[in-house]
Amino acid sequence: MAALDRYRTEDRRALDQLYRRVGGPEAAERLQLTWQWERRQNPAARHAVPWLVREGTAIIGACTALPVRVSVGGRDVTGTPVRERNVAMVYQQFINYPSMTVAQNIASPLKLRRETNIERRVRDLAERLHIEMFLDRLPAELSGGQQQRVALARALAKGAPLMLLDEPLVNLDYKLREELREELTQLFAAGDSTVVYATTEPAEALLLGGYTAVLGEGRLLQYGPTAEVFHAPASLAVARAFSDPPMNLLAARPSGAGLAIAAGPELPLPAGVALGGQAQYTVGVRASALRLQERAGDLSMHGVVELAEISGSDTYVHLASPMGSLVAQVPGVHYFDLGQPVALYVQPGQLYVFGADGALLHAPIRRGI
Amino acid sequence: MARITLDLAHSYKPQPVADSDYALLPLKMEFEDGGAYALLGPSGCGKTTMLNIMSGLLVPSHGSVLFDGRDVTRASPQERNIAQVFQFPVIYDTMTVAQNLAFPLKNRKVPEAQIRERVGAIAEMLELSGQLDQRAAGLAADAKQKISLGRGLVRPDVAAVLFDEPLTVIDPHLKWQLRRKLKQIHHELKLTLIYVTHDQIEALTFADQVVVMTRGRAVQVGAADALFERPQHVFVGHFIGSPGMNFLPVEHAEGHLQLAEHRLPAPGARTLPAGPLLVGVRPEYLARAEPGAAGALACQVLRVQDLGTSLMLTAEVAGQVLRARFDPDARLPAPGETVWLQVLGEHTCFYQNEELL
């Protein structure tokens, strides 16, 4: 407990009882964790931490959290310095040895361990990250994306059972980010390290798949298979953090056999939903569930366009409405005038319902994949 | 306000020979008076070089810059009457918000009453009215950048306002609101606005016309729908959209498009040149087809990813990877299974030497 006291006097966040249960028949083992943050230090801390769990040994809370008890593969490593834990790390900034060539950078963890066949393994890793043509260059002679690839190759060279990545793509152009995201997903899936990847971007967590822990204001809000967490967020806080564009959240109250959205339409209650007699509810609508074309049985919502953001693949239509502001994600390129009146349509079955305490009461039923 | 005509090239090297010696390859371009333009491309594509040549910070090594037909190639930014907004706030910390906004007008000896009116209007548009008497020093980064934007927009008589990635310092959650402000302001003030960015959403949302640039060339000038539907160059297909367009290398001969052992009927409605071509189809338009359907290919599923708001299917055919986007409710085959994908259709584009046919 001496360590814990020290953390407290330093007013740092502390993490309690992070442990892993080994066992179970699945190849990808499930992490069990209980988080209890001692203090809030930075309320704007990262929202989402996807965990891609593969076989191999488990977990520590590295630089952002100071753990009270952490075990890796059953061994208590709470007081063990990071460099003795056999952990590979990649940061937001592109960190390489500036005076070493790319080849020397990648080789450095192998040399430290006095491994053989270093040259071949460096080449293999460089090929996997598409930097084999830069092996003789210095990091400063490379672009940001290439520098981050070198840092990733060095982390992979370490062959550590645990790899921690802290928003590794955030400083790259979006197209490079898109490419590397895809490549990393493949690399992690092919490797046998446990990978913990911190990010604020829901799209990144979804692409990585695996498991996601959603953190908010220093608390663990939800943990589970990524798609499950996304499609059935346990609370309003998770729905807010794990949605881009943000989920539309509308105040509602009970009305007859259903719910009435304040200044909006009434909706029949989906079968099997027990409201539990609360006076206030929140109805959640994903931006992607809203459409411009009406289908049978749709609810309609009306507003005026504040802005249409065009990504190419999608148009994000921001509306001001009597229900509050709404955002719709519609596929393709669409143009709107500022202030243009627009009707949006949604199937009642696509709506989420949250109780007055923010807990999820109903999530849409999924039919895909 | 002015129409800007460029007919120039620029090299930072004294004796350029190869294409790669040029930061901007020879180009001709016209920016209409009152238009909203974006220069979009990755780092090093030449977009900032082009902006600096328009503003007068850089004299092009070859050719000329005209404002309303007048040669201003060697004129300074002041002489050109240009306003600029940079990535990071450029303001006077010791002045109040109102004094900062008034400064460009005071400098040009605009009458006091007119200054007050204009500063009030710009502050209103940028929602800075409540902070006019506050000192700029104590404000957050995004408020400071709003002042920079205001200073760029405050003079009604500028030839053009040039923006170099102005929303870099803005919190992601506030960005769309500022994009909306800029769009609204363009609507109301009808200034010529030119906006440099590497972010496709920013470019496509802000501009009526987007100039897509790569390796010193402007490969397409067009509106968002044209860039998405009919990319003039493979780079545009790749750069616009997430993920970008799929490309399949085929050999065109005798009415067939040959991809390794796979054969597609060449589209009858149009004549394509013989030889190597690229077939381009966006993930959004790569639909499932019946086995053996004309213009479809049998592909092997590599992965299906649930991206939350859509499903992404990645498949392989003849060593080429294709991505297709589906509705979240779609039922898709598992990895290893065969899926037929409709490669040829009304949205399919054909490329020769990277240019659209």
Image (spheres, coloured by chain):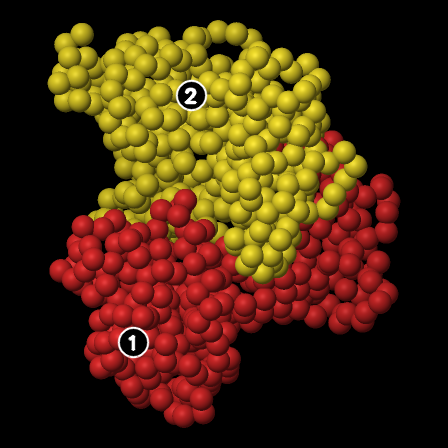
- Residue A330 at x, y percent in the picture: 63, 47
Q: Is residue A344 left or right of residue B177?
A: right
Instruction: Give the letter of the chain under mark 1.
Output: B
Chain letter for yellow? A
Residue A299 appears in the rendering: yes
Residues at marks 2 and 1 touching, judged by CB atoms closer than 8 Å: no
Q: Name the element at disc 2.
A: strand
Q: Name the element at disc 1.
A: helix
Q: Is residue A127 above or below residue B331?
A: below
Q: Is residue A105 left or right of residue B209?
A: left
- Residue A169 at x, y percent in the picture: 40, 43
Q: Is residue A274 above or below residue B145?
A: above
Marks 2 and 1, how far apart at CA:
55 Å
Instruction: Give the letter of the chain under mark 2.
Output: A
Q: Is residue B356 above or below residue A158?
A: below
Residue drawn at (36%, 89%) of the image: B72
Around disc 1, counting alpha carbons within 10 Å, would you say few (fewer than 14), some (14 to 19), or many (20 or more)?
A: few
Which quadrant is the C terminus of chain A positioned in? Answer: top right
Residue drawn at (55%, 48%) of the image: A319
Q: Which residue is mark 2?
A: A221
- Amino acid type of disc 2? Leu
Residue A84 appears in the rendering: no
